[in-house]
Amino acid sequence: MDYQALADLLFPDVTETPEEVEARFPKRNLPEGAVVTRMAPSPTGFVHLGNLVQGMISERMAHQTGGVLFLRVEDTDAKREVPGAVEVLIDTLKYYGIFFDEGATMDGDNGDYGPYRQRQRAAIYHVFAKKLVAEGKAYPCFCTEEELSALREQQEANKETTGYYGKYAIWRDRSLEDIQAQLTAGNPWVLRFRSEGSIENQFKFDDLVKGKLTITENNVDHVLLKSDGIPTYHFAHAVDDELMRTTHVVRGDEWLPSLPFHIQLFKALGFKLPKYVHIGPLMKMDGNSKRKLSKRKDPELALTYYKAEGFPIQAMREYMMTVLNSNFEDWRRANPDADINSFKFSPKKLNPAGALFDYAKLVDVSKNVISRMSAQQVYELLTEWAAEFDPEFAEKLKADPEYAVKILAIGRGGKKPRKDIATWKDAKPYMGFFYDSYLADPVFDEKFDKAVITDVLTRFLEQFDIADDANTWFDKVKGITNDIGFTTDMKAYKADPTAFPGTVADVSTFIRLAVTGQTNSPDLYTVMQILGKDRTVERIQKAIAQLG
Ligand code: GLU
């Protein structure tokens, strides 16, 4: 067979040589050890936690080595494409702090190694397809869908491995004349790889996450170009990652079964194989067993979920890093205020079986992250979230920023900051009572006589002075407690609760309920200082009136 003649027949328009194409994308001028990696999503419109995991891993690997992270859009499967999906992806990753140095952007391409959208690279793939044909490493196959299904059925009936290989690869060694006849008849064809591999052979391979793998050679003549001339994932992966000078391929381990073919393909094309980082799926506990997070069953897989719930991105990143690298938590304890990017991420520490996602732990991490923020920062992030998800609350926050910041400053800044807010959704239940329209009517414990509660509130009002310091204020509360025959001696009360009608804690609760509408609140003295004299008095008066 004259392979060059076949190549010219199949690709008459291709005039550029592989060497010329290679020369257009010179080696990147980067420091030793710099990682060049990419995210290569198919634009299906669903952005999930897995994308964030992959994004964070890729971003860290590239940027902590002085390398490059780029975005390549794998839009070869037009059927699955959702309009606007690329924009949603770019936007979401940006929201989570993952920026690309080059690649597809909102307004076209940015960088010297493009185009970064695969459908725009058809001519490039054809140059390498032609080279493979000219070297006898690829050939056209004219099998119809029906023929391929019949083949599969026959193989299944014979209990053989299904696929286009060995004696089943019926177009593998056909004559130039046969091929020419099909082309002349205008029959569609795909380009197939001529595999020289054998399933009898195995070899060792090192994956950065999975470790040492024993790989069986591929013997299937996989499709390189589909009948519309658009490459399959496999061929595009080889050509693109060669020409874009990718050093590390970070991708889901669902691609592991294709790895033998990829290794073979890189070799056939004369390309240097990149390093592979195959990441396991995100898992969760379901009862006592682990399972993959599923798009259908788990709303928490979608990244939009966390935004709506009100997890700050800092918390998401912090939590994901906790999950990805087991030494991150220790590092964080030792460096509570350090930028997360100064942690040295290592792909070798990823769990080969996939990371376990734990919602309760995320909530915990988020509480910590928010407790370390300044009141001003909390105010800004909360207001931004509320503007989208609770506009009425946002209006209240914006109406008096100084007031809101004062509220949010309660219990912040010390060694043991308050941890009332895990998500922005928690903010309103926590601080809403500071706004009159969110103030609930107090519901007092019925075991106390209304007259006693009224008495406490009246006495408090009589003595109340907004200028008091915290000690004086509390001394007054204790004074009232003793005056009405309740006790301030909690030890004595605990020893014999029947000896007293109530305690200083009950007295405080009456006042707290009157002022905040709830039995739980931040420090009551501080609450009153922020509310100010008039609002405090007004609320207590209202409670007295309600008690009748
Ligand atoms: N388009 C592939 C996917 O979405 C990319 C895999 C890769 O990163 O190579 O799974």
Image (spheres, rainbow, N blue to C red):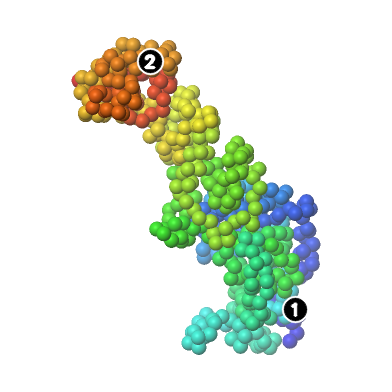
Q: Quadrant of residue 248?
A: bottom right
Q: Residue at x 54, y 81 (%)?
A: 162
Name the residue that disc number 1 marks: 135
Q: Residue at x 62, y 60 (%)?
A: 209
Horizontal arrangement in the rendering, residue 334 relative to residue 47 (left or right): right
Q: Quadrant of residue 421?
A: top left
Q: First in sequence, mark 1 or 2: give its number.
A: 1
- State whether label 1 is within 8 Å of ligand 1: no
Rendering coords of residue 317 (x, y %): 56, 46
Q: Amino acid at mark 1?
A: Glu
Visible residue check, residue 359 = yes
Residue sitting nearer the eye, 453 or 54: 453
Mark 1, mark 2: which one is toward the viewer?
2
Q: Relative to 520, does residue 191 appear above or below in the rendering?
A: below
Q: Quadrant of the N terminus?
A: bottom right
- Residue 161 disc label: none
Residue sitting nearer the eye, 491 or 224: 491
Q: Residue at x 21, y 22 (%)?
A: 450
Name the residue that disc number 2 marks: 475
Horizontal arrangement in the rendering, residue 400 relative to residue 433 (left or right): right
Visible residue check, residue 108 = no
Q: Are marks 1 and 2 in contact (CB under 8 Å)?
A: no
Q: Relative to 300, does residue 513 appear above or below in the rendering?
A: above
Where disc 1 sits, the SS reads loop
Rendering coords of residue 429 (x, y %): 38, 34
